[in-house]
């Protein structure tokens, strides 16, 4: 029986990849405008953003939703 492909669009995608792709696509300024959280607007970095997002489920959910919507529009080559 063939294996079904995963239905979770984030399956196999790390949070670091998500944040990196979003920053590459939008830049820190626009990302901070789209998701108004300090880790994107005040001295932003991948490391500080990952630290915050791993501890803050509501913020991580917003970031993941933006990434999924970006993928649906076809703006990334991520699987």
Image: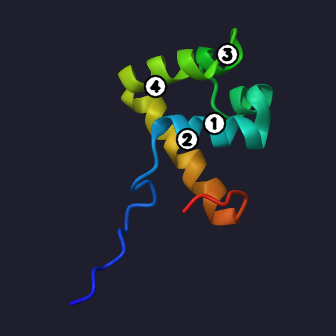
Left or right: residue 58 versus residue 77 is left
Between residue 31 and residue 2, name the one nearer to us: 2
C-beta proximity under 8 Å, tags 1 and 3: no
C-beta proximity under 8 Å, tags 2 and 1: yes
Q: CA distance from mark 1 to mark 4?
A: 13 Å
Which structural element holds mark 2?
helix
Image x and y of residue 61, in percent: 45, 39
Residue 79 in which image quadrant = bottom right
C-beta proximity under 8 Å, tags 2 and 4: no
Q: CA distance from mark 3 to mark 2?
A: 16 Å
Label 4: how many Cα within 10 Å (few below 14, some 14–19, many 20+): some
Residue at the spot 38% in from the left edge and 61% down from the top edge: 8
60 relative to 55, above or below:
below
Q: CA distance from mark 4 to mark 3?
A: 13 Å
Q: Name the residue that disc number 2 marks.
A: 17
The disc, 3 or 2, on the residue closer to the chain's N-terminal end is 2
- Marks 1 and 4: which is nearer the front? 1
Image x and y of residue 52, in percent: 47, 18
Residue at the spot 42% in from the left edge and 31% down from the top edge: 58
Q: Name the residue that disc number 4 marks.
A: 53
Q: Name the residue that disc number 1 marks.
A: 20
The disc, 1 or 3, on the residue closer to the chain's N-terminal end is 1
- Marks 2 and 4: which is nearer the front? 2
Q: CA distance from mark 1 to mark 3?
A: 12 Å
Left or right: residue 77 versus residue 13 is right
C-beta proximity under 8 Å, tags 4 and 3: no
6 relative to 58, above or below:
below
Q: Name the residue that disc number 3 marks.
A: 44
């Amino acid at each position: 029986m063939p294996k079904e492909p995963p239905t979770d669009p984030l399956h196999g995608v790390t949070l670091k990849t998500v944040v990196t792709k979003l920053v590459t696509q939008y830049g820190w300024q626009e990302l901070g405008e789209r998701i108004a959280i300090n880790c994107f607007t005040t001295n932003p970095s991948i490391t500080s953003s990952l630290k915050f997002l791993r501890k803050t489920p509501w913020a991580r959910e917003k970031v993941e939703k933006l990434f999924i919507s970006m993928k649906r529009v076809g703006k990334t080559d991520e699987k």
